Image (tube, coloured by chain):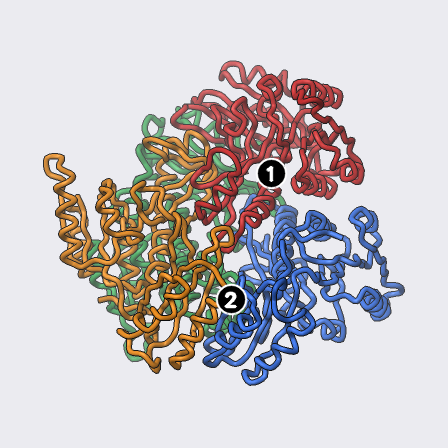
Chain colours: A orange, B red, C blue, D green
């Protein structure tokens, strides 16, 4: 299993969302300090219009006055009067990840190479695809590969198989690394804010088929990519990360597609890393991404 | 009048569009060379899909074997067999420009300051506005200011006045520097590819009122700006330049608007400069912008 | 005086630097909460290697249990046991600013236009220059202009006059908006981390005269600009902000200079805004800039 | 062997450098047209200060009036009177490439994945390393791997072995994909403008050991990467491509290194692609890179 290069000593991360009101920061800080902990990083944000408070607090596990399993129950007493929703994560307990891919290899290869290099605090358990193309790549990186073809056009049956694979691996996070099949609403609902997707974005947007051809016909000077959590409205979920690259009249449709691929790799990797580091808080179809 | 800092010695620029076929580059080059000219810059582009050839050729006026007024007639003999559309411009014959503005001053001030600093090869003749706000700014830069209010909601009458002002100044180019009035189709048709507009652009696009509020609600990570030639479909004309700036959950709607303003200044200035340097060729609702 | 568009209701900003140790966040939060305050924004950072803690805490003045003049004395009791260095600023008490400029107008004009548009929470008191060029610009924006020529090469005498002007205006912050005179060590020492300078930056760096010519000769593909606090080693102080712009073989030396000017305006404005919003903490020749 | 996705139909590329003088463009265009060729792309550039003309002309091989082997001899008659240096390349005759690598895998993996995806018009023949680490990666992509350790500190002997490997593969281009050994002047001289290297770049530059640590200590807000041709002064050769990425006080030294890795992959790939597409002309320690 790949190593994460970031975490020298294990830390606990407390992620909090609640109505904004006085005393929140003090309440959380006193909890950590009161148990002998030292806050290594703390970020908070208030959405003024919505009146919502967000916080991410990271502290060392070693020397903390509560064992791991007792942190959440103890914090519940702090959270309750403030109406806090919260979760606790540990830097050395890496999420189990499934990568879904169709034919295009670039996001998959990039992601696996980063993981092998220790850049991603993940436990990549399985690569699943409706195509057989990437079996050798998965094997090279020591990850299971599940070829799940759509037989006789029965998409529902294939999705059932896919969900069984994810369940068998007890997957925490699904990464759509250019997976070109529509997921059912039930599937998406089963992994709320735990499916990361990537897709092209343009200014202006182009609706319909072959968006890169439309962008080329329109003579855009920038093409973009958006990474987001999948929702029932597949490409309209909370945005995690976006970026663009400059293009010109010199660029053919193939050039746009190639530049788009490069961007997809980078933007997906950044979004995935933010998620794995427990820096993303989603709410109301948008996100807070602490840096 | 402001000086252009780019042109030490006057040059002629030949801008050509025609169906692609062999011999075009040689035909143009032989014309210039045959009259004793030296090509200082030459750029060409072929839109493979459309089968269209574009060229920009710049050569020194001094020492050329034809006087200025005889260049176009002489080149017509080259152009005719190739079916070329062409125009000839001279670097020291600067376009007469009108700047239209409503209340927001940032694009106007930036443009006038650049012009005063000699960055723009333009003859800025007049600033026109449906508001009185910018009279002092125009006066400071030594440019006429025409306050053209909309009286009793009569937009047509105001546009008639505006067109009279542009005609009186024999304007070659209209710059919409955050001018918030809709121009009639007739107005736009009177200045084909000679009205430059600027507007916000987002990924995804937001339709309807208050786009910055929508972008904020959607939690976008980038906001963008597009400069384009105005067409009857006002914000859908050929794109000249685009750029984006990064935003985050830290940015309020006001922050987005402010960052958008900065971007509008920069993108408008780049588009305007490209136009004034005769580097933009528009066709089929898109552009070739030579660098 | 220009208005700041950001601050609807006045806030207090507490800026803290101290050795890192447990209980800091709780201590500060308890101080604010204990006096009935609500933390609107809080950012902290730990320089792990140096063992230094940094915090910026912003809370509403209205309704806080201490009057403005009693906040710092009361907080001193919290700060003392932690060895905190701190200061308190108020969003509606804008720093008095002097802008120093030589001949190039672009940074000055951009800064004054932003200020007039309400983008900068500053009280711009005076523009001072060793050239007479910008008197009309200053007058247009309603700011005093002090023309302080260097007479008979006596730089020390000119600096003495300059310091008298700054003292007369009780200036808090000095902005070097392309001011091409070397400041004495005594001058710089009198305004620690309160002089913002801007200069070109390249990859690689070019030492000696005419850096843009050197960059052009070297064929760089990017040019950059750095904004920093001035120190005795003038261009080597703590970096506040940097950015680059792409260039190519098409760009002449004049083009590089022009693109550099655009970048200087933007980078200086961002650095100045960060300073005025009390988001910059300088230490050990570097900065923390909260976003 | 990987396929290049760009070239539908084979083209010839003529790369020309010569003293600037009238008639150059016409002379070249007449050569192509005179042999029945159609110019698909043509770019030229004049370095005004140096008085040097550069041109890249691309035309279809099929239907051209000269066979491939006769193009260069025939063009020599055009070139001679103008004092042109030139070379002819064909889009379907891909350069033989060796990739040199030490321990860091990121550039190697990215490059091989791009090659396998058909993005690079190259014939990657061999990966050579002073470490055994990448044998499996090379095997996965079907490329020979040569492990060439430095035995008893004898760098010269290792370089002799390396040169033998390159000779055996008749290599046209050497890519230093994070190869951490110094190459001798003789080695570099044997591959003029045919060794591409990549290294970090900062504003300001940092001399000496551990530059990322120095950059972190200095609090830079940007880190950069430069791809260039290797010369005897290893990191000072003609720059092909540069880019930067934004960093902040939040980034540890490890974060800087990781962000630098991402940039190295991208910048190296862009530089390599420009070289393989015959778009780079080096002269006087700088480059023209046509787009």
Q: Residue at x 62, y 24 (%)?
A: B88
Q: Is residue B123 visible?
A: no
Estimate the x, y position of residue A285 in percent, counting from the top left: 38, 47
Residue found at x 44% / y 23%:
B20
Q: Is residue D271 above or below residue D25?
A: below
The chain holding disc 1 is B
The correct choice, above or below, for D151 with respect to A174 in the image is below
Looking at the rendered structure, which numbered label has been put on residue C43? Answer: 2
Q: Position of residue B133 (x, y in %)?
A: 74, 37
Place of residue D29 in the rendered image (x, y in percent of width and height, measured from the top left): 48, 29
Q: Nearer the viewer, mark 1 or mark 2?
A: 2
* Element carrying mark 2: strand
Q: Nearer the viewer, residue D90 or B121?
A: B121
Q: Secondary structure at mark 1?
A: helix
Label of residue B279 in the image: none
Q: Residue furthest right?
A: C152
Q: CA distance from mark 1 to mark 2?
A: 36 Å
Query: Could you classify mark 2 by the number of other residues whose Cα lies within 10 Å: few (under 14), some (14-19), or many (20 or more)?
Result: some
Q: Is residue D138 left or right of residue D228?
A: left
- The answer to whether marks 1 and 2 sit on the same chain is no
Residue D144 percent coordinates (x, y):
22, 58
Front position in the image: B207 or B204: B207
Residue at 63 percent across and 27 percent down: it is B36
Task: Check contact, mark 1 vs mark 2: CB within 8 A.
Answer: no
Chain for numbered disc 2: C
Residue topped by disc 1: B268
The reply, left or right, for residue C10 in relation to residue A140 is right
Q: Residue at x 80, y 58 (%)?
A: C129
A184 and D238: which one is in front?
A184
């Amino acid at each position: 299993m790949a190593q994460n290069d970031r975490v020298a000593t294990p830390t606990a991360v407390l992620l909090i969302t609640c109505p904004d009101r006085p005393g929140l920061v003090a309440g959380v800080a006193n909890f950590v300090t009161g148990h002998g902990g030292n806050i290594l990083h703390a970020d908070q944000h208030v959405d003024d219009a919505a009146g919502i408070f967000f916080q991410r607090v990271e502290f060392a596990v070693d020397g903390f006055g509560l064992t791991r399993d007792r942190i959440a129950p103890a914090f519940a007493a702090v959270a309750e009067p403030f109406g806090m929703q919260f979760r606790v994560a540990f830097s050395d307990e890496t999420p189990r990840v499934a990568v879904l891919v169709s034919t295009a290899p670039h996001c998959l290869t990039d992601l696996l190479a980063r993981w092998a290099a220790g850049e991603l605090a993940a436990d990549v358990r399985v690569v699943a695809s409706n195509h057989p193309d990437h079996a050798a790549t998965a094997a090279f990186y020591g990850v299971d590969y599940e070829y799940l073809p759509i037989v006789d056009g029965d998409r529902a049956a294939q999705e059932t198989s896919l969900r069984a694979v994810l369940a068998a691996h007890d997957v925490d996070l699904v990464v759509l690394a250019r997976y070109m099949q529509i997921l059912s609403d039930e599937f998406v609902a089963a992994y709320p804010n735990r499916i990361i997707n990537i897709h092209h974005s343009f200014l202006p947007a182009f609706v319909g088929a072959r968006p890169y051809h439309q962008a080329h016909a329109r003579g855009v000077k920038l093409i973009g990519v958006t990474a987001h959590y999948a929702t029932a409205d597949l490409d309209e979920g909370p945005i995690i990360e976006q970026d663009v690259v400059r293009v010109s009249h010199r660029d053919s449709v193939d050039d746009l597609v190639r530049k788009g691929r490069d961007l997809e790799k980078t933007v997906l990797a950044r979004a995935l890393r933010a998620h794995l580091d427990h820096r993303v808080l989603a709410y109301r179809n948008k996100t807070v991404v602490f840096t």
